[in-house]
Image (spheres, rainbow, N blue to C red):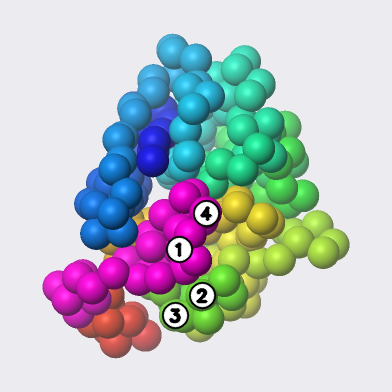
Amino acid sequence: MRIVRIHNELLGTYGDRGNADVLAFRSKFHGVKSEIIDVSYREPLPTNGNIYLLGGAEDAAQVLSLQALQRDGILPELIENGAVLLAICAGFQIIGNSFYAGGKEVEGLGLLDIKSVPGKERFVGDVKVRAAVLDLELTGFENHAGHTILGKGIQPFGKVSVGYGNGDGKHDGAMSGNIFGTYMHGPVLARNPDFADLLICRATGRKYQTINDPLATQYSAWRRKVTK
Ligand code: GLN
C-alpha cells in the first residue's frame, strides 16, 4: 500500500504528517506492506498511490500546494480510479470548488461540490464529531477561519457535538466515495485509530476491520472522554 504524503513542506503546519505514520504502522497488523512516499510541490504527484494525504496549512502555502496539484492535473483521475483521499482543513478546502486565501477567492480542484468562505472569527479548539461512515465519535483539533458550505446532496463527514467543524457547529467535513474531508487535526488518525483502519481497508479492498492495539484504543477513548 503506497501512502502519498502530499507537499508536507507546505501542508505540514499542523502536524498532519502523522496520519501517514499511523497508516504505515497499523497496516502491518492488517498484514499489508506499506510505504510512505513524500512528494514535494516541486515534483510531480506520483500516480501509483493507494492513499493520498493532504494536510492543513496557512493560506499562502495552501495556494502554492493547490497550484502544484493543478499543474499535475492528475489527482481527480487517481481518486476516480479507486485511490483513497484524506484531506484535512486547508487540504479539505483545496479539494472543493473554491475557498478564500489572504482575503481573495481562489478556485479549488472541484473534487467535491463544496465551497469555503471566511468567517468572522477563527475556530480554535477541540472538536468531537460522530463520523457517519463509522458511526463512531471521533475527536480532533481545529484551527481555521473557513466556513464550508456543502452542495446539495453532499454528505458531511460527521455531526459535531463539540467545536465548530464546517463553521455552523453542526457538521464537519464532507465525503463522497473514497474522498474524506474534515477539519480535524490531531493528527486525526492518531486520535482515532478506527478511522485509520477504515482507510487501510478501503485502499486495499478489504472488509472493514479494526486491529487490536490497546494503547492506541485507550488513548482514543481518553480523548473522547475529555473532549467536551
Ligand atoms: N488557511 C485555512 C483557514 O484558515 C486552513 C487552516 C488549516 O489548515 N488549519 O481556514
Q: Position of residue 51 (x, y in %)?
A: 46, 42
Instruction: Answer whether residue 58 is visible to the viewer in this image.
Output: no
Mark 3–mark 4 Cα distance, whole angstroms, equals 24 Å
User: Residue 216 lies in magenta, yes or no?
Assistant: yes
Q: Secondary structure at mark 3?
A: strand
Q: Which residue is mark 4?
A: 205
CB atoms of marks 2 and 1 within 8 Å: yes
Image location of residue 172, percent across then percent down: 57, 67
Residue 198, labelled with which disc? Answer: 1
Residues at marks 3 and 2, CA–CA distance in whole angstroms: 8 Å
Which amino acid lies under the numbered mark 2 shown in the image of this protein? Leu
Mark carried by residue 134: 2
Rendered location of residue 143, percent (x, y): 42, 56
Residue depicted at 28% across the width and 54% down the height? 31
Question: How far apart are the two marked residues, 2 and 1, measured between alpha carbons?
Answer: 8 Å
Is residue 17 left or right of 222 when viewed as pictured?
right
Asked which secondary structure carries label 4, the reply is loop
Q: Residues within 10 Å of mark 4 (few under 14, many from 20)?
A: few
Tag 3: residue type? Answer: Glu
Q: Residue furthest left?
A: 215
Q: Position of residue 204 (x, y in %)?
A: 47, 50
Extent of the magenta region: 192-218
